[in-house]
Image (tube, rainbow, N blue to C red):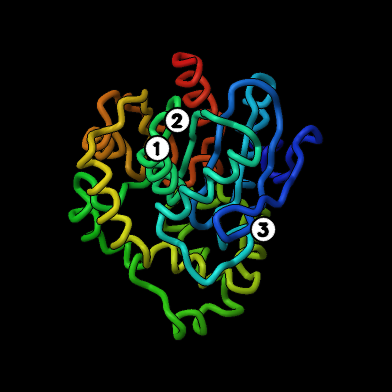
Amino acid sequence: MQARGRDFIYPKYFRARKIVTNGTRLHVRVGGAGPAIVLIHGYGETGDMWVPLARELAPDHTVVVPDLRGMGLSSVPSGGYDKKTQARDVAGVLDALRIDRAAFVTHDIGNMVGFAFAMSYRSRVTRFVLIDAPLPGVGPWDEILKNPLLWHFRFGGPDMERLVKGRERIYLDRFWNEFSATPKRFTEAARRHYAKLYARPGAMRAGFAQFAAFDQDAIDNKAFLADGKLEIPVLALGGEKSFGTTMAAVMRFAATNVEEGVVPVSGHWIMEENPKATVAMVRAFLGEHL
């Protein structure tokens, strides 16, 4: 499965669309037939990360895979990188595709966008898999921020953009190496693929903006939770060498029905380091809650 998935090419029955939504234009891949599932990527990757999972789900699901605003092949607006705004981006995509309800599978910053969507449009999410990243303002967020590995949360601005211009690969290698259990599993081909996408005009600025919005995201998440926790089935997955069971601990502050899982022999980059186990765990959870 790993070799097949790392060509970043979706099956021929997937089609790519440019969908105008909420003042931006998202690159969206759509394929398969059946109950809808939305797959949302995080920083350091794009929707291309989900190829192995999309292939597995498409025979009996309609699979929707957007690139977030400012990332991948989506347009790069000047603002709107708080996750509440990006939840509206996703809502517009589903509206354009005439999809009322969907399951969500998310990773990294995708968790934050998916959570904002689930809280903003509670009746539209059937079940939710969040993978290996905390939620701003939720549970032990303030303690998590003290981890020195997370210095990049505050890295950004015009001077930082100048520092990384033409050196995108060097900057991103730091993430792929330090947050992997086994860095060589994040292959050279994958590194070249994503570095090229993040070298597109405005992409690094947009990536920094995703992190700069965390303070507002924390405010928004606390306001969401003032109206009550999520009640849908939730699977909180952490990489064994990354967030591990902390993911479930975080999500129990935000949801009432949380199942815990750990992706073995993996750090943060679960689809690069152990796609077989990740796909199996996601598939099993979705099958239990159809």
Residue indicated by mark 3: 73
Spatial CA span between label 2 and label 1: 6 Å
As shown in the figure, which amino acid type bears the numbered disc 2?
Val
Q: Nearer the viewer, residue 249 or 226?
A: 226
Q: Nearer the viewer, residue 200 or 33?
A: 33
As shown in the figure, which amino acid type bears the numbered disc 3?
Leu
* Percent coordinates x, y for residue 81 in the rendering: 45, 62
Residue indicated by mark 2: 125
Residue indicated by mark 1: 118
Q: Is residue 246 left or right of residue 207?
A: left
Spatial CA span between label 1 and label 3: 24 Å
Task: Say whether marks 2 and 1 touch (CB < 8 Å).
Answer: yes
* Percent coordinates x, y for residue 66 in the rendering: 60, 46
Element carrying mark 1: helix
Element carrying mark 3: loop
Element carrying mark 2: strand
User: Along the polypeptide, which appears first: circle 2 or circle 3?
Assistant: 3
Whether residue 267 is visible: no
